[in-house]
Image (spheres, grey):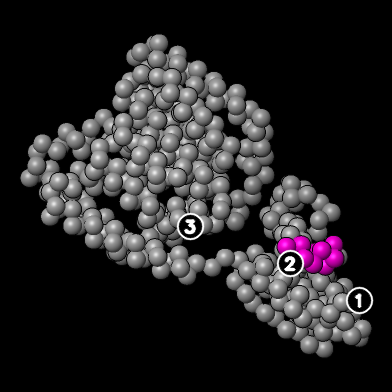
Amino acid sequence: MTVAYLFFGTRKVLSRDERIMSTLLGSLSYGYIFYALSVKQYSAMILIATIATISYLEIAIARRVDRRAGATVAAACVGLAYLNYFGMVYACVLLASLAVTLRRNRAQLRLVGLLAAVFAIAYLPIAYFLYLQLAYAPGDWQVYEIKSFVADVWSLLLFDDPTYATAAFCMLFASLLVVRIMRPETRALLWSERHRHIAAIAAAFLALMLALGMSKPIFFARYFLVVFPAVLLGLGVLTAAIFPLGRGRLAILPLAFFAYASVIQFRAIDGMQRQEWDKSVDLVLASRKPHDAVYVLGAKPDRSGFDYLREGNIDGYFYVRNIKFYEYYFKRRGAGEVAAGLRTVEPTVKSAMDIAARFRGSGTTVYVLAGHHIQYGDDALAALEAAARHVTITRLFSTIVYKLKF
């Protein structure tokens, strides 16, 4: 839907060449593809951010808020805010930028104020949950590895070949310098009001994120996804200006770039692995006997995720849901009785010793399912190996199956 909108829904803002270049960039962005295939809300956020950005440009260029564009911006901003709290930040940037652009026209400024009021009222029902995120999200796990962060953003924005992508980017800006000299008539196009608006909203959002990153753990590539539509839109119009399709020889360069990108993305997606919760369940069902016990490694479900978060236990916040996930996969396999009998054990030495004390010498086989990067530590595993007759560890992608024979 995002790709279709870029090509068919942007005629009022982009020329034919710009639509083609922007659509190609969007269709080959690894972030766009990955989150669509992962069925995560980020994919919907990217679509709505694209619509919001284009509608913003329609209003900013025309310098008037018409009914259709105004309603679209308001609806898109609310959608962004509900999908993601950084989407809320981007929505605020768009509305603030509209106010700055139309500040000299009081009638239009009042309409922007009306859009902002609609946005604020619609956001009120979930504003408290933003407070919870900011108040209780722990910051001690943030890693300030700027080089790694930049590399992740670069790979997510384009594709996972940073050397080639960087070389192409350098060639693009070298070509920009040549074009400014060889084709003076393109100077006005390259720094048009539309281009300034795209650059301004992207720069404003990034400045806010960098300021927030000084105190909160946000330097992760996925948190910057909401600005990808504006960045790729800017790259698209820039590429179209430098390599117009009407001049066939110049168009060979972006054609070669997109052809290479399509090969890289095909290989990356073809080899993409998903967390193998279902395969770990299949392994258990294939060998489990009726009296074997099945446990899930995680946090005790006697407290909510928010209770763990309030204590500063970020692992507990995530791992309290593990048992629900495994119940789902057992039910999908028609093993409802196994799902109903699942119990949670924590990845601690005490928990491992409790299992050992309960089943030692009983002849029972115990399965412990570990999902989403959780696992027993060396001490806990040593306690189990000392008590059990045999321990088998099967490692899958992001999941582990421990088979303990007592």
Q: Residue at x 45, y 55 (%)?
A: 33
Per the rendered image, the range of residues in magenta is: 331-340
Check disc 1: other Cα within 10 Å, few if <14, some if 14-19, many if 20+: few
Main SS class of the magenta portion in the image: helix
Give the amino acid at mark 1: Arg
In the picture, the disc for residue 34 is 3
Magenta-span inclusion, residue 319: no
Q: Amino acid at mark 3?
A: Phe
Element under disc 3: helix
Q: Position of residue 289 (x, y in %)?
A: 84, 79
- In the rendered view, tell whether residue 298 sits above or below residue 202: below
Amino acid tagged 2: Arg
- Tell me residue 299's x, y (percent): 77, 60
The residue labelled by disc 2 is: 333
Distance, label 1 to label 2, CA atoms, is 28 Å
Assign a secondary structure to mark 2: loop
Q: x and y percent of residue 132 in the render?
A: 67, 39
Q: In this rendering, is residue 348 above or below 30?
A: below
Residue identifier under label 1: 358
Q: Circle 1 — which element?
A: helix
